[in-house]
Amino acid sequence: MLARYIPSGLRGTINRQNFFEGWFQKIYSMEHQASVVIIYGYATQNPPDRFGFIQILVPGENPQCYYFPKQEVRMDPTNHIVRMGKNLLSTQEVLIFTELFQINLRMSVTYPIRGLKNSMGYTYYIPNLPCYHAVLNPAHLVSGSIEYQGKSILLSNERGYLEKNWGTSFPQNYLWLHALDPSDSGVSVLFSYASIEWMGKSFDKHVGHIRFRGIEIDLRELRQVEIRCNKKSPSVYVISLISKTVSLVIEVISVKQVMFKGPNYGKLSRDILHHADSKIFVTLTSESHHESFQLIGNFEDIGSLFMP
């Protein structure tokens, strides 16, 4: 049974009460020095005519959100395809056609993480957590075009990242970031830290990784971990992770803030402040490494994890 469980697989449980399933696709455009973000999924407590959703953020614009009735949301678990009306969203292709957007993207050179060694490990077997997380592709290449309001973004083998969440709600208190080095496809950081409510109790959980020069450090596997979150100013955040073997310091300088919608008890009703294309400075220290990276990334800080 354990071997057959695929965290990154399509759930497709559209008839379950108080449930959501959502995907976060990010593409960094070197030409525009900015990210394109496409968030799509479904929320079963939304009204039937707003059951499915697609949120789109392109450089220089505010996010746009489109809703789709339940009868137009269809799933193909075999090929991991989600269809909403005439739009197709999958791990290999994205086709979106709205009154403002025409998006045609293809993903290649994929590095999917299919097994249990995804971001949450054996935590996947804890039933009824409010939110689960999985990385579908940590570093794929994206090509295609995005046309909107008379503008055009042409992408040719640009850096992409794809993850998903499912459950009932995002945690009340969490932080999340994903960052990359636009000039080095081998460097990326994923980090998330949350206070999780479960069965009347609360516990803290962190997941993530840092990749560089063919090395991957799984932050989930570190022992004796202490995490500190400090807000140095309205736009500067510092996250320190100290373990028995590794010290990791992440400084986030917020550049642009936008508002997305997130799930709350199966309904897409929660405002999520998203820091787009932040400057992220990472320092890693261990017995065998002393590394510093200047990255570009996306960041969310929801609730009260950060102390002034």
Image: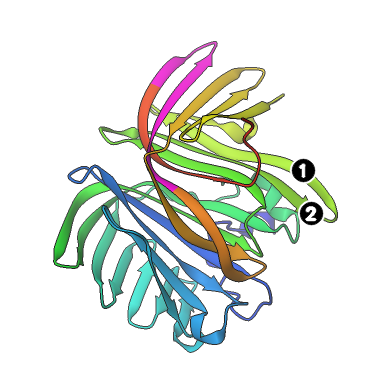
Q: Which residues are magenta?
A: 275-292
Q: Nearer the viewer, residue 197 or 64?
A: 64
Question: What percent of the width, then of the height, locates residue 302?
Answer: 59, 48
> In the figure, 98 relative to 247: above or below?
below
- Residue drawn at (58%, 58%), measured in percent from left and top? 6
Residue density around tag 2, few if under 14, some if 14–19, many if 20 or more, within 10 Å = few
What's under tag 2, amino acid-wise?
Trp
Q: What percent of the width, then of the height, locates residue 122?
A: 69, 47
Q: In front here: 303 or 198? A: 303
Contact (Cβ within 8 Å) of mark 1 with mark 2: yes
At 50% from the left and 80% from the top, the residue drawn is 50
Q: Earlier in the sequence, mark 1 or mark 2?
A: 2
Q: According to the image, label 2 marks what residue?
A: 198
Residue designated by label 1: 203
Q: Is residue 114 visible?
A: no
* Above or below for 96 versus 211: below
Which image quarter: residue 90?
Answer: bottom left
